[in-house]
Image (cartoon, rainbow, N blue to C red):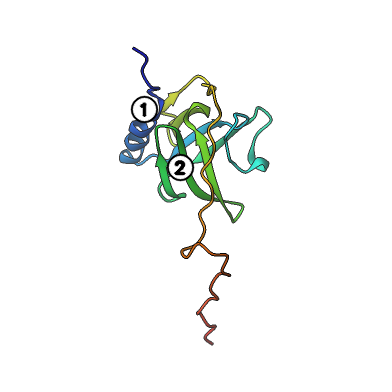
Amino acid sequence: MEMTSNRPYLLRAIYEWLVDNNCTPHLVVFANVPGVVVPQQHINKDGQIILNIAPSAVKDLFIANEAVSFSARFSGVVHNIYVPCGAVLGIYGRENGQGMMFELELPSTPPTPPEPTKPDGGGDTPPKKSFLKVVK
């Protein structure tokens, strides 16, 4: 009987364990795998990127069975991150290095990242102007 990968289950468990122990979870990702969406300027010469996935550093973190996705700021710019689970090489705590490393798993068919969602209404309406005013 062929079983699904245990990697996403281990990622979720170790993430929770690190956060419960007040550690800052980081993902080591091999960015050259098809389907990986990360800021290219932050990939090192080995094709890897280390992502801080602490609750205070990311928004909408979702560790699904297929991929890890969230949004985060890099140099002040918001990026939507999408990492197929097979591209995750490890998860560890910044403070003590505790965690787990994995072998690279290349998918037989590359996953496709989700389409960016349009604002409510579905049309191409311009964003609303800010209602904040400068008070002196």
Which residue occupies the foreground of this view, 110 or 85? Answer: 110
Q: Residue 118: where, in percent of width, then height?
A: 52, 58
Q: Secondary structure at mark 1?
A: helix
- Across and down, in percent, residue 55 comes to 40, 48
Camera-side residue: 105 or 88? 105
Q: Nearer the viewer, mark 1 or mark 2?
A: 1
Q: Are marks 1 and 2 in contact (CB under 8 Å)?
A: no
Q: Amino acid at mark 1?
A: Leu
- Look at 59% across and 41% down and name the residue there: 38
Residue picked out by circle 2: 53
Res 107 label? none
Q: Where the N terminus falls, by quadrant?
A: top left
In the rendered image, residue 29, in percent from the top left (x then y), is placed at 54, 31
Where disc 2 sits, the SS reads loop
**Relative to 66, 16 lies left or right:** left
State the image coordinates of residue 88 (x, y, percent, origin top left). Answer: 50, 29
Q: Is residue 44 above or below residue 126?
A: above
Residue in the image at 32% along x and 38% along y: 21
Classed neighbour count for the residue bearing mark 2: other residues with Cα under 10 Å, few (<14), some (14–19), many (≥20): many
Residue tagged 1:
10
Outermost residue toward the bottom in this view: 136
- Dot 1 or dot 2, earlier in sequence: 1
Q: Amino acid at mark 2?
A: Ile
